[in-house]
Amino acid sequence: MTSILVLNGPNINLLGTRQPEVYGTTTLAQIEESCHQTAAELGCEIAFRQSNHEGTMIDEIHAARGVHAGIVLNAGAYTHTSIALMDAIASVELPAIELHLSNVHAREPFRHVSYISKVSIGIICGFGPAGYPLALRAMADHLGAAV
Ligand code: DQA
């Protein structure tokens, strides 16, 4: 069965209480549950991960090769800073979708820069927690179209 890695970066574990005016009140556990429901509808598997550490995220991306068919990545603030995460995505040659809860382009200028965009097949941002199921559907559609 096709498997998709959903990888979350720093501070995403605090969803529910973190700046609710920006990120809402849905917890990461609730988002994970919605991803499992969507995966069941799509007939695919997911692995749902979160780390506050850049190196751990890179290790997760490396380990995805040969295991997962694609990566949905909310890299948090590393989106705007991490050449290493960009290189990791490029190195494993798996399709990646960049995901953000907030509309980063409507926020501070430093959030308008994304290293992840350069190695992503597409970007979903600004739809809050609903972006996760949207990204999974987009990835499943992309993978279906690819075979
Ligand atoms: C975020 C947007 C980033 O700019 C921010 O650093 C985050 C969360 C989002 O999901 O909206 O941590 O990735």
Image: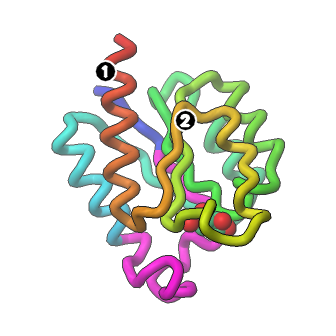
Q: From the image, which quarter does the N terminus lie in? A: top left
Element carrying mark 2 = strand
Residue 81 percent coordinates (x, y): 81, 55
Report the disc number at residue 122: none
Does residue 138 appear left or right of residue 80 in this picture? left
Of label 1 and label 2, which has the lower sequence position?
2
Q: At which x and y percent is residue 24?
A: 43, 81
Which of the 4 quarters of the picture holds residue 52? bottom right
Q: Mark 2 belongs to which amino acid? A: Ala
In the displayed structure image, the side of residue 12 where residue 25 appears, left or right: left
**Does mark 1's beta carbon lie closer than 8 Å to ligand 1?**
no
3 vs 125, nearest the viewer? 125
Disc number placed over residue 96 in the picture, else none = 2
Q: Which residue is drawn at 72% across and 49% down?
A: 114
Q: Is residue 25 magenta?
A: yes
- Depth check, front residue: 8 or 1: 8
